[in-house]
Amino acid sequence: MGADSTKGVPFLSLGDSYTIGESVPEADRWSVQLAEMLRKDGIAVAPPDIIARTGWTTAELMDGIQAARKEKNYELVSLLIGVNNQYRGQSIERFRTEFRSLLETSIAYAAGRKERVFVLSIPDWGVSPFGAGSDRGKVAREIDAFNAVAKEECDKAGILYIDITPLSRTGLGDPSMFASDGLHFSGKMYGLWAMEALPKVKGLLSK
């Protein structure tokens, strides 16, 4: 699915399993739902180009972006990354450095317009059925720490940061909020993220 300027604003969505929509249909991906919501509201946005893969850390996303060789001609760019850094026990310091680089890359894809870039916070996988076997409190604290860094770097760079982590935590004990694999979120949850992002992204597109 390519970003076709004849169908609206070209949109690039960067990330990991939560952006590629592991274990859900393509139409249920959060950025695909967001583009559809924008179109319904009369804002022509193309179906997003997606560079994302399940399991990717910040470094692996950087490699994936280079391998994809996309032209830097997007008018809207989203970034959601970091859960696998936390899951693998990578350092906050490394995350900060690599996340900052990804912000710079995202701005470059938006033709230098930082006001057309937005970041979604890292959701809390600990609330999933899979997460029941983990120390959910520890996972939550670590996710919060990574998100604090992401927000700080977004604030420094003047990039919109959208906090969907509280929404992810509402999934605790609700099977409908998770995909069949018991780890990743469902299209229903992704729809909540898209709804949260919708008014804020509308604001970006008016700039």
Image (spheres, rainbow, N blue to C red):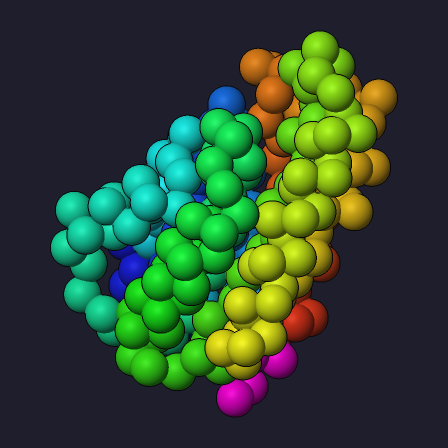
Height in image: 55 above or below 146?
above
Q: Is residue 44 visible?
A: no
Report the residue that reaches farthest toward the top.
133
Classify residue 204 by image quadrant: bottom right
Is most of the magenta stretch helix, strand or loop? Answer: helix
Which of 76 and 143 lies nearest the eye of the viewer?
Answer: 143
Classify residue 171 by image quadrant: top right
Height in image: 160 above or below 18?
below
Task: Report whether 131 appears left or right of 16.
Answer: right
Task: Report whether 202 appears left or right of 80.
Answer: right
Height in image: 190 above or below 176?
below
Q: Give the percent coordinates (x, y) of residue 15.
A: 43, 46
Height in image: 106 above or below 190?
below
Which of 112 and 137 lies nearest the eye of the viewer?
Answer: 137
Q: Residue at x 38, y 54 (%)?
A: 98
Q: Residue at x 66, y 41 (%)?
A: 143
Q: Give the percent coordinates (x, y) of residue 23.
A: 50, 23
Is 206 within the magenta?
yes
Which of 162 and 46 lies nearest the eye of the viewer?
Answer: 162
Report the residue that reaches farthest toward the bottom.
207
Is 136 within the magenta?
no
Task: Report whether 179 appears left or right of 116.
Answer: right
Task: Report whether 87 appears left or right of 72.
Answer: right
In the image, the segment drawn in magenta is 203-207
Q: Residue at x 52, y 88 (%)?
A: 207
Q: Give the percent coordinates (x, y) of residue 29.
A: 52, 41
Q: Residue at x 63, y 52 (%)?
A: 147
